[in-house]
Amino acid sequence: MTGEAIVAAYVFILAIFVGFEVVSKVPSTLHTPLMSGANAIHGIVIVGAMLVASAIPGPIGVVLGFLAVVLGTANVVGGFVVTDRMLAMFKQRPARKRE
Amino acid sequence: MTVETLIPVAYLIAAITFILGLKGLSSPTTAVQGNRIAATGMLIAVIATFFAADVRGGVPLILAGVAVGGIAGFVGARMVKMTAMPQMVALFNGAGGGAAALVSILEYARHLGAGSLELGATVATLLGLIIGAVSFSGSAIAFGKLQGIITPKAFKYAGQQFVTGGIAAAVVLLSVFLIAASIPGGTPPVDSAITPMLLIAAIALLALVFGVALVMPIGGADMPVVISLLNAYTGLAVAMAGFTLNNQLLIVAGTLVGASGTILTRLMSKAMNRSLGNVLFGAFGAATTAGAGAATAGDDGRSIRSIGPEDAAILLSYAQNVIVVPGYGLAVAQAQHSVRELADLLESKGISVKYAIHPVAGRMPGHMNVLLAEANVPYDKLFDMDQINPEFQRADVALVIGANDVTNPAARSNPGSPIYGMPILDVDKAQNIIVIKRSMKPGFAGIDNDLYLDPKTAMLFGDAKDAVGKVVQELKKAA
């Protein structure tokens, strides 16, 4: 294994533990928004799509690269906006109580 | 120092925001903030990437893609009704999976062209491609089932396991071919640059078919768990694409989602008292024997009692404690505002109104909370299953609005029922039960509900919003 691959493996393993740890106690009310938020975060694939969008010359490469960027962006934008809309409905509560 | 050396720093900041974002999303008070922090990190990462050397030539193409995807995502997310949120999450998740699969293919092709292919990168590419493609087609099916384009019933046929298993075996076999080709010094079964791409295309196609075969046999009631699982899959696919690209940010973010998504999936299946294996391979909607058993129970002389809105209004106005049990029917009919009006009216008469929220009522955990919050139902009126269950025996009326499987006593009493063991709301313990329902059609699990045959139960047939509205009118007339 190259040095780079070992570093990547370390990052992978540590991220697994962080991921397990971060969401271990979630009230069931937040399951859906949390899933939706996590959904938006894996939209980071947009960065990968940008990096390879013009990696392959020729029409097939362009079409696939374009598609990857479109799908990645839809994932990011749609994911965060949907999550925000869900959470906006929860947010009213404390505001109402203060009335 | 050039701008490019700052890109890894931007990525590091983004990775931190994702961790903080997920942490924030796990608690009600910090959830909104958490989502925005993660979104900010995403923006930083995307802007930084525009300065990367690999990107510069393709900026117009990327901008065009961002415009199309961004508008589609934004409009889709803004226009969708709150009831359709679950399938929207499925759709965006599928988009991410598809993107991860495409990124894997493109990076593989680039390595292949440059002659820089290594074993590790090949394995990571294959995993990213396969998992991403499964998530893409699986999410599409989940979307179709929730949207009603495809039958929400479990789709089963004889020899299903063998077909699904055969597809999986074919994917593995072709992958082994491709890996063998990339071992240095080994005898590659393929030698031209074109053939590996054909293999990749075949694997992608088979993985797509596998995703369809995986989700089709799962009934609509289990879709939330499936979407959560596919969400974790996409995370993993993105992490694998990160390995191929040697991009730490993709590895961190993808793995975070993969790990937290797995935990979340387990929490969700636990809320339904089912193991994940049971959801994926068990037969929820297909248990015809138990369904037949419940149907014969209806033939032993018990019958269904149907009432009109005026009877329901009288029953409610003489009650002291009312528990509302909302379900998917409420969401479909957009009845949350009418329900709020009804509750206000009852409360003005000094009647206590509480809401019983089953963890999987609706199509997603938290679905009912979101809808009722939209109608400004106070948060402290909503009760979890464990809190409210002991109160049903003191309730004069349990008003079931469009909920079905989560109230089915068969889950407690009939070991033959496919939902046996699932925790339910003890609606049948209430003094009187009013069920508002469109028809006698079974719920999403596809099984009959004994509750409707209970002598204490009165059925008020109609659309949830309509029926509640009529009850409100009757109550106002009486006042």
Image (tube, coloured by chain):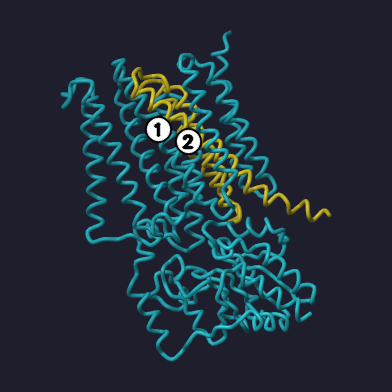
Chain colours: A yellow, B cyan
Residue located 62% across and 77% down the image: B398
Q: Position of residue A3 (x, y in %)?
A: 40, 20
Q: How would you rate the neighbour count of disc 2 (Cα within 10 Å): few for under 14, some for 14-19, many for 20 or more?
A: many
Q: Secondary structure at mark 2?
A: helix
Q: Position of residue A54 (x, y in %)?
A: 41, 19
Which of the image's four quarters has the N terminus of chain B? top right
Q: Earlier in the sequence, mark 1 or mark 2?
A: 1
Which numbered circle lies on residue B254? 2
Q: Secondary structure at mark 1?
A: helix
Residue located 72% across and 70% down the image: B343
Which of the image's four quarters has the C terminus of chain B? bottom right
Q: Position of residue B356 (x, y in %)?
A: 62, 68
User: Vertical placement of A86 versus B320: above or below?
Assistant: above
In the image, B459: left or right of A1? right
Which numbered circle lies on residue B452? none
Question: Pointer 1: what residue?
Answer: B240
Query: Same chain for marks 1 and 2?
Result: yes
Tag 2, which chain?
Answer: B
User: Vertical placement of B87 versus A48: above or below?
Assistant: below
**Amino acid type of the residue that numbered disc 2 sits on in the rendered structure:** Gly
In the image, B211: left or right of B252? left
In the image, B419: left or right of B71? left
Residue located 44% across and 25% down the image: A7
In the image, B341: left or right of B14? right
Q: CA distance from mark 1 to mark 2?
A: 8 Å
Q: Residue furthest top?
A: B1
Q: Are marks 1 and 2 in contact (CB under 8 Å)?
A: yes
Q: Residue furthest bottom?
A: B301
Q: Position of residue B82 (x, y in %)?
A: 59, 53
**Amino acid type of the residue that numbered disc 1 sits on in the rendered structure:** Met
Residue located 34% across and 69% down the image: B287
